[in-house]
Image: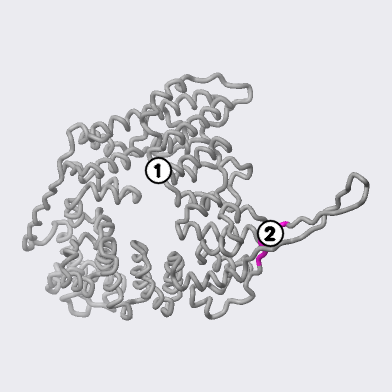
Amino acid sequence: MTRTSAPVDAPGADAWEGLVTTALLGTDRRTPPGAAPGPDAPLALLDAAAMETVRRRAGLRPARAAERPRAAPEDVRPALPPAAARRLAMLLADRPGPSGGGRRGAAPDLTELLPQWLAVANARGFAPPPQVLPALLDAARGRTDLRPAALEFAGPRALWLARLNPDWRFALRAAPGGGASLPHLHDEDEVRRLWQEGLFAERVALLSALRSRTPAAARDLLASTWGTERAEDRLMFLDSLREGLGPDDEPFLDQALADRSRNVRATAAELLSALPGSALAARMAVRAEECVAIDHMRSAQPSGTGGGIPGGTTQTAVTIAVEAPHECDPGMERDGVVAKAPAGRGERSWWLGQLVEAAPLGTWSRRLGGRTPREIVALPVADGWQGELHAAWCRAAVRQRDAAWSRALLGDPSAPEAGGPGAVSLAERAKLLGTLGAAERAEWVAGFIAAHGLSEAFQLLGVCAVPWAAPLGRAVVDALNIARDAGSYPWSFSGVMGLAERCLDPSEASRLDALLAVPDEPENASPGAGGYWAEAFQRLVTTLRLRAAMAEELGAA
């Protein structure tokens, strides 16, 4: 006997989920669509499930055809030379294999050459062949460090593709304003309309672009809506004023010191302290001067005369005396001093450091007897305050971009302490080096390597301009050669060797040919170290020659 079920309505978009829910709850608690409660409800559920199964397996319902995408925008930049286009395809086709910790061999790492290739291609203003854009976007998707250069090279067509493929949506987020085009910056009405109506990313991009061209106009635009912005947005917008920061920004930043957000107040105070002529910097100077002074200590030294009559001389020892603040008053807090010290820090030393780093560095020559930065840093500091005081001066030198103080705090690169009188960490040394010119920076690091080797130099090498200047390149190669001759573990220097592959001047390749042979291993050498070193230098030479060929293909000197 055949039983028929009640008619079943066509399931909607969420029909399958509804049927699953009905099956889980039971038809006595929930009736399937189109069925009446009772003994036929289970059969109606099965019929509906069978129909929906066929519908799901059959494919999509007929629908109105989607609108065809607009044509990709034109890229008016000159096309890549054919040899460079082939090189790009080769670089993009290379994929890093799984890291097994084994030998790298003598072949160059092409994935590490792609960023340099992109930098040169962007400097030359070339456009990519359209067929490589998918591979270029895939490479940028997997490497965030590659994205800025890759998207600049990919141009407007990358954004067009990103709107069609969800895997490449990062390009819209990374592009200023989410890929939206900014109005002409001279069109005041359009600029103001986007500022008032645009998305947050669009407004950040607009403010940054305007700040880089007309700092005053960007500041006035921000001031026009400052009181209505959210705290987190105010912080981001305020940070954009670092570009082109100048004395004209002081009135606006001074108002921001009274902001209801602590982070906004701290950022405004930091920016004001980077302006040595600001009123905040002057207030900080007065507070800091009360804490730091010269102390002339007199001591009697016994001496004798030829006739045996006792006598004595008095010598004066000059030291820096420190008296840290005993409280953090409301005025200090308004000027950006954070009252609560981090865990493990004493309150007084915490307050002292903030005052000194915010005071103009020119304060100290006047306060400490007209001495130069180098002379000041050489003075002893009483009562164990030297580390705290010098560390604060380091932060001030970086914030104020003061090369004279940076040189004094770095000291001589060959100094036995391998860090200078004021730089207490590699990170601080690297930041201080960043305030110097490229040639001076390279010369200092070369001296450091010659005196101390490569074990501590990796972070310092990272702040040097590429390609490395000749003295720095020679210092690195000489140090690697010394390590090889000593039978050191070659893999201990793999990071520096990788940097050398990317940063040595390609013209150095011919000078390295003498290092390609397998060296004689001393008795205390690591087993097989000579073969590893020969491979590493072979890879270095091959990579340098490949970089030279890449530059020639792109028409770069």
Q: Nearer the viewer, mark 2 or mark 1?
A: 2
Q: Is residue 321 inside the magenta stretch? A: yes
Asked whether the residues under the numbered discs 2 and 1 touch, taking CB atoms below 8 Å apart as contact, a structural biologist would say no
Q: CA distance from mark 2 to mark 1?
A: 38 Å
- Residue position for label 1: 465
Q: Is residue 310 left or right of residue 531?
A: right
Q: Residue furthest right?
A: 308
Examine the rendered structure and indicate whether residue 219 appears above or below residue 461.
Answer: below
Could one spot residue 363 in this view of the protein?
yes
- Residue 424 appears in view: no
Q: Where's residue 495, x and y in %?
A: 47, 39
Tell which of 417 and 177 is nearer to you: 417
Figure label count: 2
What x and y, as percent, mark residue 550?
Answer: 28, 33
User: Any mark on residue 390, and which?
Assistant: none
Identified at 45% across, 20% down, the residue is: 514
Q: Earlier in the sequence, mark 2 or mark 1?
A: 2
The stretch of residues the image draws in magenta is 317-322
| Residue 349, horizontal then vertical, whole percent | 62, 67
The disc label shown at residue 319, or none: 2
Counting other residues with Cα less than 10 Å from the Cα at mark 2, is it few (<14), some (14-19), or many (20 or more)? some
Taking the view exactly as shown, the residue that stands out farthest to the front is 307
Q: Position of residue 151 (x, y in %)?
A: 25, 50
Check disc 2 and report its element: helix, strand or loop. strand
Q: Is residue 416 left or right of residue 393?
A: right
Q: Is residue 207 magenta?
A: no
Q: Amino acid at mark 1?
A: Ala
- In the foreground, 65 or 367: 367
Tag 2: residue type? Thr
Q: Secondary structure at mark 1?
A: loop
